[in-house]
């Protein structure tokens, strides 16, 4: 297989047929052996039925149906796990990312790169608040992480089989795939494009899901939150020490104080600072460790027409 196209879907019945037709129009003339892998992430509409109908007429259409909604990043992971193409494209089903860009992405990959990501010049059909928060998040993430995660990019990209195999060696529960791909390294480049507005339906990426994705990205690739907790804890403890000096001065020099107030204020501020340090460091590490120690599967497949076994990479990539 030359090319696999992974498409996570969640309530995308308005866009699936149009997406399929545009993909066929783009990939067909490339004269490649290809497959479309639709990953149904617990859709509540007719998305799965439409994909199954396409699969009944086109053997290149594969589908994976989850037992419930596991999230966009996990859906992408499942598609990557079951793909067999030498190159794999990740694209959403809402048609905001144009399928026509697959051609220049693939051409760039053939020039010796292992990753070619699509970088947005503009974002149409999105609110000012969403544009601002997205821009702010990408720039904060770029500053606080110890790897170079490109700004103004999503998951729309093409990656080589070598990168897919490397991703399979990273089974952490809190997935942030674009960060993992940057961490892997290899030669990476980009193609710029203008992102269109959503073709139909409503986005499944609510603000709560966007916040969760942002936290996954920050905590997975940066220890800045832990450092911030530590620094703020020391600051509070320093303030507590100054208050302690002030209360001692009031108690023994000016004699102007309320009984019990010095000891109460000192205890609250000092203990608050110490607890902030402890909770910030211990809590963050334990929460992430506990999720991975359970070793639960990332997803459960309810139904699929992919009969081949998931290919497992070797422990060391050649």
Image (cartoon, helix red, strand yellow):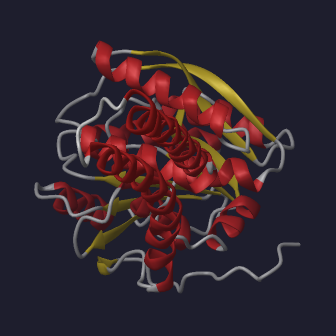
Quadrant housing residue 21: top left
Q: Measured along the vertical axis of the image, is residue 32 above or below residue 197?
A: below
The answer to whether residue 126 is seen in the rendering is no
Quadrant housing residue 81: bottom right
Quadrant housing residue 258: top left
- The quadrant of the rendering that contains the N terminus is bottom right
Q: Is residue 318 left or right of residue 151?
A: right
Q: Residue 169's spot in the image, x, y percent?
A: 67, 74
Q: Residue at x 30, y 18 (%)?
A: 129
Residue closest to the eye, 301 or 56: 301
- The quadrant of the rendering that contains the C terminus is bottom right
Q: Is residue 112 left or right of residue 236?
A: right
The mark tally for this picture is 0
Q: Is residue 273 left or right of residue 211?
A: right
Q: Residue 310's spot in the image, x, y percent?
A: 55, 82
Residue at the left extreme of this rendering: 45
Q: Residue at x 54, y 64 (%)?
A: 80
Q: Residue 151's spot in the image, x, y percent?
A: 60, 28
Residue closest to the eye, 250 or 29: 250
Q: Measured along the vertical axis of the image, is residue 8 above or below residue 157?
A: below
Q: Residue 152's spot in the image, x, y percent?
A: 55, 26
């Amino acid at each position: 297989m030359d090319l696999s196209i992974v498409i996570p879907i969640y309530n995308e019945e308005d866009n699936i047929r149009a997406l399929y037709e545009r993909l066929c129009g783009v990939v067909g003339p490339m004269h490649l052996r290809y497959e479309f892998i639709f990953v149904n992430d617990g859709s509540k509409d007719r998305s799965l039925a439409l994909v199954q109908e396409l699969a009944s007429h086109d053997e290149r259409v594969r589908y994976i149906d989850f037992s419930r909604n596991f999230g966009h990043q996990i859906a992408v992971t499942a598609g990557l796990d079951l793909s067999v193409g030498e190159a794999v494209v990740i694209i959403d089903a809402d048609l905001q990312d144009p399928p026509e860009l697959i051609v220049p992405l693939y051409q760039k990959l053939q020039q010796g790169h292992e990753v070619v990501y699509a970088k947005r010049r503009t974002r149409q059909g999105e609110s000012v608040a969403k544009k601002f928060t997205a821009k702010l998040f990408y720039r904060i993430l770029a500053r606080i992480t110890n790897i170079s995660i490109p700004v103004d990019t999503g998951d729309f990209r093409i990656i080589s089989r070598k990168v897919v195999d490397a991703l399979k060696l990273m089974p952490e529960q809190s997935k942030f795939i674009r960060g993992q791909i940057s961490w892997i390294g290899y030669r990476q480049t980009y193609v710029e494009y203008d992102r269109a507005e959503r073709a139909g339906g409503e986005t499944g990426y609510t603000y709560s899901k966007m916040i969760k994705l942002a936290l996954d990205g920050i905590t997975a690739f940066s220890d800045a939150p832990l450092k911030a907790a530590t620094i703020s804890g020391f600051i509070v403890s320093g303030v507590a020490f100054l208050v302690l000096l002030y209360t001692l001065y009031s108690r023994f020099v000016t004699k102007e104080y309320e009984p019990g107030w010095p000891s109460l204020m000192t205890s609250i501020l000092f203990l608050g600072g110490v607890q902030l340090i402890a909770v910030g460091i211990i809590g963050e590490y334990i929460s992430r460790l506990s999720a991975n120690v359970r070793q639960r599967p990332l997803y459960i497949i309810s139904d699929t027409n992919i009969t081949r076994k998931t290919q497992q990479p070797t422990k060391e990539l050649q």
